[in-house]
Amino acid sequence: MNIHIIACGGAVMHNIALALHNLGHTITGSDDEIFEPALSRLKVKGILPEQFGWFPDKINQNLDFIILGMHARADNPELEKAQKIGVKIYSFPEYVYEHSKDKIRIVVGGSHGKTTTTAMIMHVLKSLNKSFDYLVGSQLEGFDTMVKFSDAPLMVIEGDEYLTSTLDPIPKFLKYHPHFAQITGIAWDHINVFPTFKGYVHQFELFANSILPKGKLIYFSEDIELQKIANNTPIENKAYTTPKFEIINHKVVIENEKKYELEIFGEHNLQNMEGAKLLCECIGISNDEFYSAMQSFAGTAKRLEKVLDTKDLIIFRDFAHSPSKLKATADAVKQQYADCKILAIFELHTFSSLSKDFLPQFLNCMEKADQSIVYFNPHVFEQKKWQ
Amino acid sequence: MAVINKADIKSGFGDNIEVISETSELVEKISDFKSNVLAQPRVLLLMSSGNFDNATLW
């Protein structure tokens, strides 16, 4: 098929382009800017646009369909041309659903932990040589791309609550209609598009109710909002909680009929793992198969990623930026390294919840560290008009 | 968009937080922490949604 991708340079979008190219489709694309690593990866496959910018001439009746990236605006000239001549347009989550509509779909949602939880499930499936497609929001070790499309009977999807596209301002995860879904927790985020907590929580309620009638919701029962959602949804649901564990020589050991030593740590990771286990149970994976595979799961890049490990000094980096993620990460490090002196540094960078009014949400979020620093670069704030 | 300054950040995060806006000062703090060998082991936790992956920091 001939497929054109508007805004093909983003992290997920260029991976979709690569995945469709790998399936043998003819791919064209456009973007106003494309940065590394997308630039080199598209170039190697011969699908990097010759010029940056938008070119309505690329849109014609020979296209089978268009996939619209998130950062294309409503007045994008290629989008306007496509609408004018009537070419079918999918947002990327709509296309992911279209591709996977005859497969079993597993979707992981939640304000935090969804990339790591999705990665856990992918790691377990790969360890067990299961055939599956996937969409995940980070480049994972052991996987060449963030998106895979094939004829596999199963697709694992990281379900993001952020908006679908300029044409369709509803959360992406509402497009997937999962058979089995996990919600890891709800902590207010993306206040630029969800200005009230109530409105934000409602998106997860809609997500729970978007699960197919004979499907199942897996949820973290220590989250009060999730408990309410589970109580009110007609969808069958199953709760998980924090598993019992020990820390022995800075390693987490859990017991489930037998003992398993894990590379991951932090209560939030262990909670998410319990949800992942229940999701895997839905597709016939036993507890022993799951935990045995999890022993070799080392986490994902920039999520409690150990970048230095010496006798006297350990350095982690983490993508945490919302208050709940900062707290979970700092708490996890203190719990795992209770005998160590901990310096936590947070770079206050730009993201969808950064505003003066939101700052009080961060109160004491790094209190478990012995010393805490917030760093910000005034130049970055100026660029975003935050001065 | 409201102006965000150091005082806002300190107020939001709490009094026990140090706020730094100069990269050189941050690098110095990290360097001090790394070189100051103590009786107990040390853990440095770097968190960011942005470009904090600059390896010169560690």
Image (cartoon, coloured by chain):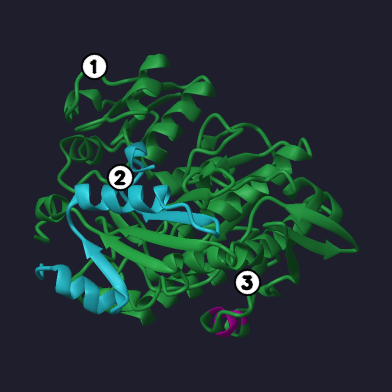
Q: Quadrant of the C terminus of chain A?
A: bottom left
Residue bearing mark 2 = B51
> In the image, residue A318 lies at what x, y percent?
45, 53
- The majority secondary structure of the magenta stretch comes to helix
Q: Callout 3 environment at 10 Å: few (<14), some (14 to 19), or many (20+)? A: many
Q: Quadrant of the N terminus of chain A?
A: top left
**Secondary structure under the numbered disc 2 in the rendered image:** loop
Nearest-to-viewer mark from 2 and 3: 2
Range covered by the magenta-colored residues = A226-230
Which mark, residue A50? 1
Mark 3 lies on a secondary structure that is strand
Which chain is painted in green?
A
Whole-percent x, y for residue A225 in the image: 51, 82
Q: Residue at x 52, y 52 (%)?
A: A304
- Which residue sits furthest right? A257
In front of the other: A119 or A285 = A119
Q: Secondary structure at mark 1?
A: loop
Q: Position of residue A293 (x, y in %)?
A: 77, 46
Q: Amino acid at mark 3?
A: Tyr
